[in-house]
Image: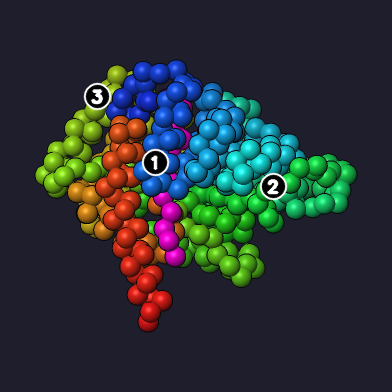
Amino acid sequence: MPVEFLGIGGTQDGSETNPRTTAAFDRDYTLKLARAHADNGWDRVLFAYGAGAPEPAQVAAFVASKVPDLQILLAHRPNVSYPTFAAKTFATLDHISDGRLTVHFITGGNDHEQQREGDYLTKDERYDRTREYIGIVKKAWTSREPFDHTGTHYRFADFVSDIFPVQQPRIGVSFGGSSPAAYAAGGAEADIYCLWGEPLAETAEQIAAVRAAARAAGRTDVPRIQVAFRPIIAPTEELAWEKAHRILGRIEARKAAGPLSRRHPATAPENTGSQRLLAVAERGDRFDRALWTATAKATGGAGNSNALVGTPETVARALLDYVDLGVDILSARGYDIYDDTVDFGRYVIPLVREEVAKRDRAAAAA
């Protein structure tokens, strides 16, 4: 099966290494970055969510109307809107994008970040709410008859939407997390399960946990698996590692001057995913073929923060190692966001696609 590539639908040019030089939502930069993905072999881009950040559904609609050959992954936190309203929003965006939308539901791993927008539930309560929320949204996408709902977190009567997704029977659902509660919720509800890049052994364990949760929920299928990395590539191994250490130095310099992000604490993260990244980093800074944990350690395990370092050929082979584990979607985001989008698309994506296609041809001929 062909592998897919996910990039970042950024609205401004800042990163952990570079303070932004644009507005929080720069229309020209947003469109330029989206077109760089579309023109360089990427399949879709993520429009992320953060308290105080530009509203991602509107940004996604803007990009979808301007870039017709790029899939959209929209991040959404259930605490910010009622599920019936969200279902209509997503269905409308699916029409704007001609059926190119997937929705990534975020439960929220940091209490303080959630409280910025009025969410005071505990983490376990948030997972319970997310699972209920996704179920309502799915029903709103598919039910042509009015329905009632009385649950732990939501109650309403006689709802039926007047707009349904272009995609039938519904829009795809994406989900992420590394705790048992996350596996249970995502295993039950997700079409795509998202993980942050860890060593191969730990990734295999997480994939097994997701699949076990799907079976425990009574599913006959299993979610597709997505894994995310920060690629650092150069023409030679030596140059790639020199580049990697320059990037680390810039992260450390920015951190010394102030917080890298309001969204993620630099120390003592609450979410299991970040805790796992830091635990791996404590064991060492290099794993498997090209995985480098120093960037995760420097940022406090903030989100997608483990790097793959090497030549395009080395990074492509490292990504193929994850494909061999059963990974379907490879997510990548560089530190110089625009230039790294172009370079990764030109020099890494074709190598991975060529090898996967060769394997598929060999399997079909066997």
Q: In which quarter of the view is residue 156 placed?
A: top right
Q: Which mark is residue 253?
A: 3
Query: Which residue, given by chain and number where applicable, does mark 2 sit on?
Result: 165
**Gap between marks 3 and 1 measured at Cα:** 33 Å
- The boundaries of the magenta stretch are 1-12
Circle nearer the N terminus (3, 1): 1
Picture quarter with the C terminus = bottom left
Residue in view at x 35 percent, y 75 percent: 362
Query: Which residue, given by chain and number where applicable, does mark 1 sit on?
Result: 39
Q: Nearer the viewer, residue 271 or 12?
A: 12
Q: Is residue 206 visible?
A: no
**Gap between marks 2 and 3 measured at Cα:** 46 Å
Q: In which quarter of the view is residue 222 placed?
A: bottom right
Q: Is residue 157 left or right of residue 112?
A: right
The disc labelled 1 sits on which kind of residue? Asp
Residue in view at x 26 percent, y 47 percent: 347
Question: For numbered disc 1, what is the local secondary structure?
Answer: helix
15 is within the stretch colored magenta: no
Q: Is residue 192 left or right of residue 196?
A: right
Q: Is residue 169 above or below residue 81?
A: below
Circle nearer the N terminus (2, 3): 2
Q: Is residue 355 above or below residue 44?
A: below
Question: Is disc 3 surrounded by few (<14), some (14 to 19) or many (20+) residues within 10 Å?
Answer: few
Task: State yes or no: discs 2 and 3 in contact (Cβ < 8 Å).
Answer: no
Question: For numbered disc 2, what is the local secondary structure?
Answer: loop
Picture quarter with the N terminus = bottom left
